[in-house]
Every structure is written in structure tokens, then in C-alpha cells.
Image (cartoon, helix red, strand yellow):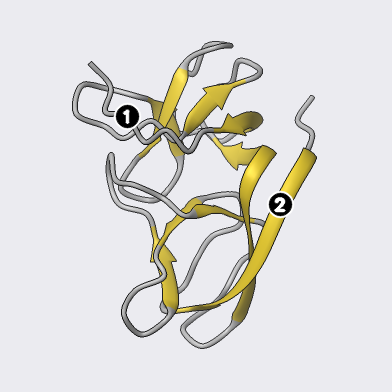
Amino acid sequence: MAFTERMATRTYTSGAAIAQFTFVAGPASDGQIDPCGDGARACGVALMAATGAGEAITVAYDGRVTVKAAGNITRGAAVASDSAGEAVAAASGDVILGYALEAGVDNQIITVELSRAELAAA
């Protein structure tokens, strides 16, 4: 059962459409956030959706947060972002964004402990 706990948040302006419970990157030079790229560094997880650019969006940047899984993730696995900003098991070269506190399958909402270490997976 997915949950949130000890979460720290910030509110940003979206630079594009952003899906709820996905990793986001930024802020860019224009101060806006965008969906996170494949294996890239993230500034947090979108707690709400944005239908386009210019919308206020709250982002969790620390704590235990819910994210959408894209594929199978085992409990305790290091997670990274796929090209849609969804959580996947970290692969070689990916920036580790957190660790799964529960197992999940494709399209399931799971809880992740965000990590700010930003180490590339080996």
C-alpha cells in the first residue's frame, strides 16, 4: 500500500504537461520544471498533474513519496527515471533517485524514499 511520509515540498511553475506521481527535472533557466528524462537527475516528484506550461505544481523533493512504476521494481531496489519520468529499476549509468520501499509492477503507484545522493548506478 503506497503512502507518503516526512515529505518536504516546493511549488514551481510547469514548463510542459506533467503527469502526477512522476519525476520532474529543473528548474530550468526560465525557472520552470519539466518531466524528467531517462536516467537523468530529478528535483523531485510531481504530487499533482499539470496539463501544460505555466501551471503551479507542487513537487516533493525529500521524504517518502508515491511514484508511478514503469515495469517491475523489487522492494529495496534503487530507482531511476524512464523517459516519461516514471520509476524504473536503476540501470548502469542512471542517476539513482531513491529506493523502493515496496515492490511494484507496471502502472502501480509505489512508495520510494527519495535520495539526494545522485550516484550513477553501477
Image point (58%, 11%), residue name: 75
Image point (51%, 33%), residue name: 115
Image point (44%, 27%), residue name: 79
The percent coordinates of residue 52 (x first, y second) are 49, 81
Q: Quadrant of residue 107?
A: top right
Q: Give the alpha-carbon distance from disc 1 to disc 2, as whole Å.
A: 21 Å
Residue 14 visible in the current orientation: yes
The percent coordinates of residue 118 (x first, y second) are 36, 36
Give the side of residue 40 with respect to residue 8, left or right. left
Furthest-front residue in view? Answer: 117
Where 80 falls versus 46 (above or below)? above
| Quadrant where the C terminus is found in the figure | top left
Q: Nearer the viewer, residue 87 or 72?
A: 87
Where 1 falls versus 16 (above or below)? above
Q: How many marks?
A: 2
Where 83 falls versus 73 (above or below)? below
The percent coordinates of residue 35 (x first, y second) are 40, 60
Check disc 2 and report its element: helix, strand or loop.
strand
Q: In the rendered image, which residue does mark 2 sit on? A: 8
What kind of residue is marked 2? Answer: Ala
Q: In the rendered image, which residue does mark 1 sit on? A: 119
Q: Are marks 1 and 2 in contact (CB under 8 Å)?
A: no
Q: Quadrant of residue 5?
A: top right
The percent coordinates of residue 94 (x first, y second) are 26, 32
